[in-house]
Image: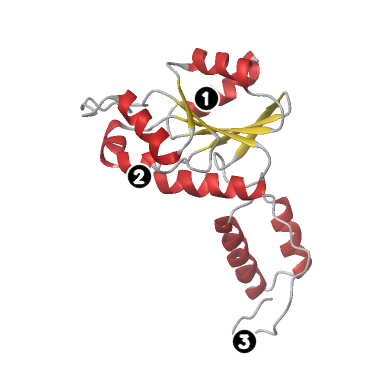
């Protein structure tokens, strides 16, 4: 239902958007309201929303391997990660969810360690990559292995630590198949890792 000042109320039915998550629904609703306000027809609004390609590195489907979807996402802050995983779990209820997470910046991980430890609750498996340091030369201040243990304890997730891109390739070949989602998350080189997998599998 569209109710705007100075305009006749209208109802848009059977609206489809290719993205999921409450934030995308809210954004689509706001865009539809503005379009309607400036005189765009209901049909054009519905067509535009249905065809919208989304924003790069926001839940982009990269490829499918053995019935598993491989996704690239920019989420690198605990709140973003929780939101994406919650949205995924709401839509893909039966699939196994593999989160392939590369922390971005030593400083971010250092100051948000507790928040990161709690943000993977909606994943079934967490593949924890080395930190993408982004040129920082500061010390982490705690053992990375202890951080992994804290995630297991707080998020109740199966966790696998990997050393590099080749380790990720081995893990995928040996473990990911069937109806599942593998979501690469982070603001560093993880996007390239996920895209490179497609050519190596």
Q: CA distance from mark 2 to mark 1?
A: 26 Å
Q: Using the image as rendered, state which of residue 55 and residue 106 is in the foreground.
A: 106
Res. 192 mark: 1
Q: CA distance from mark 3 to mark 1?
A: 49 Å
Query: Which residue lies under the disc numbered 2?
Result: 115
Q: CA distance from mark 3 to mark 2?
A: 45 Å
Quadrant that contains the C terminus? top right
Vertical position of residue 201 compared to residue 61: above or below:
above
Name which quarter of the figure residue 150 lies in. top left
Asked whether disc 3 touches disc 1, contact meaning CB atoms under 8 Å apart, the reply is no
Tell which circle, 3 or 2, labels the residue nearer the N-terminal end.
3
Say left or right for 66 vs 5. right
Name which quarter of the figure residue 136 lies in. top left
Q: Using the image as rendered, state which of residue 130 and residue 133 is in the foreground.
A: 130
Name which quarter of the figure residue 188 lies in. top left
Vertical position of residue 12 compared to residue 133: above or below:
below
Q: Using the image as rendered, state which of residue 137 and residue 84 is in the foreground.
A: 84
Point 52% across, 18% down: residue = 168
At mark 3, the secondary structure is loop
At mark 2, the secondary structure is helix
Image spot of residue 60 (x, y percent): 61, 38
User: Is any part of residue 200 visible from this angle?
Assistant: yes
At mark 1, the secondary structure is helix
Say left or right for 19 vs 112. right
Tell which circle, 3 or 1, labels the residue nearer the N-terminal end.
3
Point 62% across, 14% down: residue = 200
Image spot of residue 122 (x, y percent): 53, 43
Quadrant that contains the N terminus? bottom right
Query: Which residue lies under the disc numbered 3?
Result: 6
């Amino acid at each position: 239902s569209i109710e705007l000042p100075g305009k006749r109320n209208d109802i848009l039915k059977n609206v489809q958007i290719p993205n999921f998550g409450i934030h995308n629904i809210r954004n689509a609703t706001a865009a539809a309201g503005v379009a309607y306000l400036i005189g765009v027809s209901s049909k054009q609004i519905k067509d535009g929303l249905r065809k919208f390609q989304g924003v790069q590195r926001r839940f982009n489907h990269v490829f499918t391997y053995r019935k598993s979807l491989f996704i690239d996402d920019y989420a690198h802050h605990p709140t973003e990660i929780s939101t994406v995983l919650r949205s995924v779990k709401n839509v893909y209820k039966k699939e196994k969810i593999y989160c392939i997470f590369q922390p971005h910046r030593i400083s971010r991980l250092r100051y948000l360690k507790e928040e990161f430890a709690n943000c993977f609750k909606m994943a079934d498996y967490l593949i924890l990559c080395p930190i993408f340091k982004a040129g920082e030369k500061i010390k982490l201040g705690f053992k990375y292995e202890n951080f992994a243990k804290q995630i297991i304890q707080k998020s109740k997730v199966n966790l696998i630590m990997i050393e590099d891109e080749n380790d990720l390739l081995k893990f995928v070949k040996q473990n990911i198949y069937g109806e599942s989602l593998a979501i690469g998350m982070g603001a560093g080189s993880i996007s390239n890792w996920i895209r490179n997998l497609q050519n190596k599998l």
